[in-house]
Image (cartoon, rainbow, N blue to C red):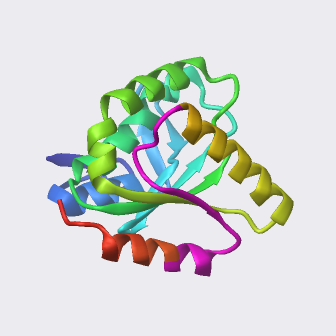
């Protein structure tokens, strides 16, 4: 696999190239000849930071889903650290593309993602997130563990346990 880094106009190959491409701060969006902010950051691999925007413009929906696909294409175990919105509002194209991808990739999510953790320092918001997460898990089976914690230290400890205890693919 080869990727072109629009910031440096160079080609990088393989896993290293993919990690570099999905962790740069901006990604060229060809349909608008502009840059868009990435929401997947792999610089701390196997910790993958996913910052969900409040809204995803329809023109950027597929590019956002492709960032997720690129993480799973590495075919290596990882843990998601979630931040930002739970799901973007007023983003029908993203929600349709993300929903279709999520359903179609359930097996690979189950195999590679050891868990997802949301860091929320506010105890009240943590409780609210936990209630919504429990309700979602009752309604639809989740492909991986999900936890809401107070800080980065707790998240890192949990991620370490998940990565150490899970069987290798």
Task: Give coordinates of residue 143: x percent, y percent.
Answer: 40, 44
Please name the residue shown 72% across and 63% down the image: 120
User: Left or right: where does residue 73 sit relative to residue 135?
Assistant: left
Q: Is residue 127 above or below residue 27?
A: below
Q: Is residue 142 above or below residue 60?
A: below
**Is residue 19 in the magenta section?**
no
Label count reads 0
User: Left or right: where does residue 29 sit relative to residue 10?
Assistant: right
Please name the residue shown 31% across and 28% down the image: 104
Task: Give coordinates of residue 166: x percent, y percent.
Answer: 30, 67
Regarding residue 5, the answer to whether it shows in the image is: no
Task: Give coordinates of residue 29: x percent, y percent.
Answer: 44, 34
Report the front residue among 7 and 105.
105
Regarding residue 93, the answer to whether it shows in the image is: yes
Q: Residue furthest front?
A: 138
Instruction: Give the magenta part as a residue range.
Output: 140-157
Quarter of the image where one finds residue 10: bottom left
Report the front residue among 152 and 163.
163
Please name the residue shown 30% across and 59% down the image: 19
Report the front residue among 85 and 111.
111
Report the front residue among 156 and 127.
127
* Quadrant where the C terminus is found in the figure: bottom left
Q: Is residue 123 above or below residue 105?
A: below
Please name the residue shown 45% across and 72% down the image: 159
Quarter of the image where one finds residue 153: bottom right
Task: Give coordinates of residue 160: x percent, y percent.
Answer: 42, 77
């Amino acid at each position: 696999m080869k990727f072109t880094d629009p910031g440096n106009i160079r080609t990088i190959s393989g896993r290293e190239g993919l990690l570099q491409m999905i962790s740069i701060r901006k990604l060229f969006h060809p349909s608008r000849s502009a840059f868009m902010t990435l929401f997947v950051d792999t610089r701390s691999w196997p910790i993958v930071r996913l910052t969900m925007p409040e809204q995803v413009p329809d023109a950027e929906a597929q590019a956002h889903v492709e960032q997720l696909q690129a993480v799973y294409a590495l075919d290596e175990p990882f843990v998601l650290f979630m931040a930002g919105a739970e799901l973007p509002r007023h983003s029908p194209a993203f929600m349709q593309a993300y929903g279709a991808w999520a359903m179609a990739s359930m097996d690979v999510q189950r195999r590679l993602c050891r868990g997802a953790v949301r860091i929320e320092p506010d105890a009240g918001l943590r409780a609210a997130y936990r209630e919504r997460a429990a309700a979602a898990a009752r309604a639809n089976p989740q492909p991986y563990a999900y936890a809401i914690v107070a800080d980065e230290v707790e998240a890192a400890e949990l991620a370490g346990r998940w990565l150490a205890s899970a069987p290798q693919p």
